[in-house]
Amino acid sequence: MINAKMSFAIALFLTCSAIAGSVPRVLAERPAGFAVEFSNCVESIGVGLVPTEQARALVPAEFQLVGEGGPMTPLVVRTARCNGIAVAGPRPKAGSIVQLGVVIVPPDFTGDINNYTLWYYTSDAKLAHHLARLGVRAQHVPTIDYDYGSDGSFFVNVPRPGRPLVSVDGTVVEPENSSGSFVANWWAIVDGCRVKMETNVPEIFIGDANLTLTTNPNGPLGQLIGGASTGFPVLQQFNTFADARMTVRVNSR
């Protein structure tokens, strides 16, 4: 079951195990983690369904899919645009994020939703760099197109060098009422250890959306969704929040 409140989140993971207690130098030189402050953000959330067998092939065995044992399991597609993204310090700058993953059972029993990260794109070079230093395959795409109009139109496009290419379009309704706080965790495995991207949103406003995801039908995402496009029958939202904090850290297994 997916919590009706969905919001922004990031999850990373790092290498944490070593034979006989020794840590390889290349891993020891990686930072233990970092924090990101987000301000004045809008985001779209779409939750659809993909074949469990195909999703299972993309997710490490230690993570349990929400749809484990059934024919379908949830896929999450999140886009966000923030007026301020401050990575490991001050000096925020505007930027966008697009991330895709599958919903998993909470590995550490925390968060309102937990997802395993399949693809992550951001226009913020510093954020992409910090994630890459931890081993997370974050793609820096400087020209993510993120547009929404007063008429409710909505369009997000991830061009090259992003792979696979992704776009989300449709209509959105800006929210009016607060839905309280929300915590979203996104996970990954890097060199045998977990990286957790935990985003805490103190207050989120949740609105409606009608969205479609489009990609190359022959690419890895197209093969996962079974074609060039898909809707989001499980959940669709257009959210806003004034601030959020993402903590990225290595978790022992």
Image: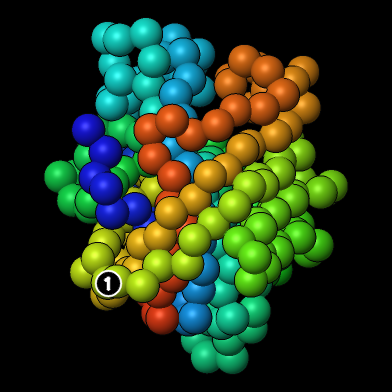
Q: Residue at x 81, y 49 (%)?
A: 159
With respect to residue 145, does 219 lie above or below?
above
Residue at 65% over, 56% down: 154
Residue at (19% x, 44% y) in the render? 108
Residue under label 1? 178
Residue found at the far left of this picture:
109
Q: Position of residue 138 (x, y in %)?
A: 62, 51
Residue 244 appears in the picture as rendered: yes
Q: Based on the displayed image, in which of its 4 quarters is residue 212 positioned?
A: top right
Q: Is residue 70 left or right of residue 195?
A: left
**Left or right of residue 34, residue 159 in this image:** right
**Is label 1 in a helix, a strand or a loop?**
loop
Is 144 situated above or below 99?
Answer: below
Q: Is residue 127 above or below residue 251?
A: below
Please give left or right for residue 106 compared with residue 208 in the image.
left
Residue 49 image point, x, y percent: 44, 24
Residue at point 71% right, 44% down?
Answer: 167
User: Extreme bottom residue here?
Assistant: 91
